[in-house]
Each structure stands twice: as structure tokens, then as C-alpha cells.
Image (cartoon, rainbow, N blue to C red):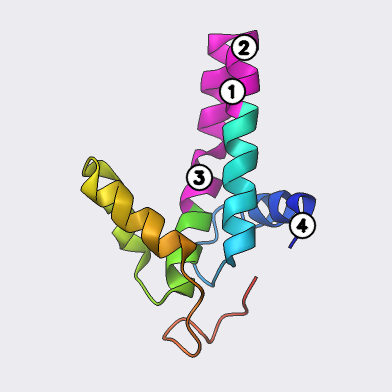
Amino acid sequence: MTFGESISTCFSKYAAFDGRASRSEYWWFFLFAFLASAATSLISETMSGLFSLAVLLPSLAVGARRLHDVNKSGWFLLLWIIPIIGWIVLIVWAVQEGKEPNRFSSAASA
């Protein structure tokens, strides 16, 4: 999946927490959100806050779909509130290859 396809897919599945997201979809969207947030923070703090709010739901949705791809529940995103250890666990899961078949296989892979 390319950079543009990833952004398009994530915004078209704005609040779709079901299904699966490939590594490329997740990481390209992560890169987009990071770079755009950095760019908007240079322009205005308010604009950066509005952008972060606008991508919050699609970021959570693609994160849950990414966890589904490695056969984990989307609820594991709550590990993000545990500093260091939770972050490391989520990053390790995010870089793993998807598991086939798994309990989320019935939904089409993105």
C-alpha cells in the first residue's frame, strides 16, 4: 500500500474498528499524522490541536485494525496509557507480520 492509498483508506474507514489493517497502511498513516502534526504546530498551536482532534478517531480505528491483523483485540490500544512498557508492547505488535488465519479473518484485509 502506498502513502496516498493509506491516507485515503484510513479516512474512508474513519470510524471502522472492524477488519484488519496491514503494516504499511498503519505506518504510512502514522507517518502522515506525525508529519502533518509537526507542520501544523509550526503554523499555529490551535491548528495543530484541531488537526490532532481530526485524526484522533481514524488513528484509533487504524490502530485497532492493526491489532486485529496480529490477532489481538482492539481494546489492547488502552495499553497506550501505561508509560514505556505499554508503548513498547504496542510498537512490537504493530511491527509484526499479520497472522493468517486468525479470528478477524472473516473481514477483508485492507
The answer to which of marks 1 and 3 sits earlier in the sequence is: 1
Residue position marked by numbered label 2 in the rendering: 42
Secondary structure under tag 3 reads: helix
Q: CA distance from mark 4 to mark 2?
A: 26 Å
Dot 2: within a 10 Å radius of its alpha carbon, few (fewer than 14), some, or many (20 or more) residues?
A: few
85 lies above or below 54: below
Residue position marked by numbered label 4 in the rendering: 2
Span shown in magenta: 37-60
What kind of residue is marked 2? Leu
Residue position marked by numbered label 3 in the rendering: 57
Q: Position of residue 51 (x, y in %)?
A: 59, 27
Q: Residue at x 63, y 31 (%)?
A: 35
Secondary structure under tag 2 reads: helix
The answer to which of marks 3 and 2 sits earlier in the sequence is: 2
The answer to which of marks 4 and 1 sits earlier in the sequence is: 4
Q: Are marks 4 and 1 in contact (CB under 8 Å)?
A: no
What kind of residue is marked 1? Ala
Instruction: Tell us which disc is closer to us: 1 or 3.
Output: 1
The quarter holding residue 81 reads top left
Residue position marked by numbered label 1 in the rendering: 38
What kind of residue is marked 4? Thr
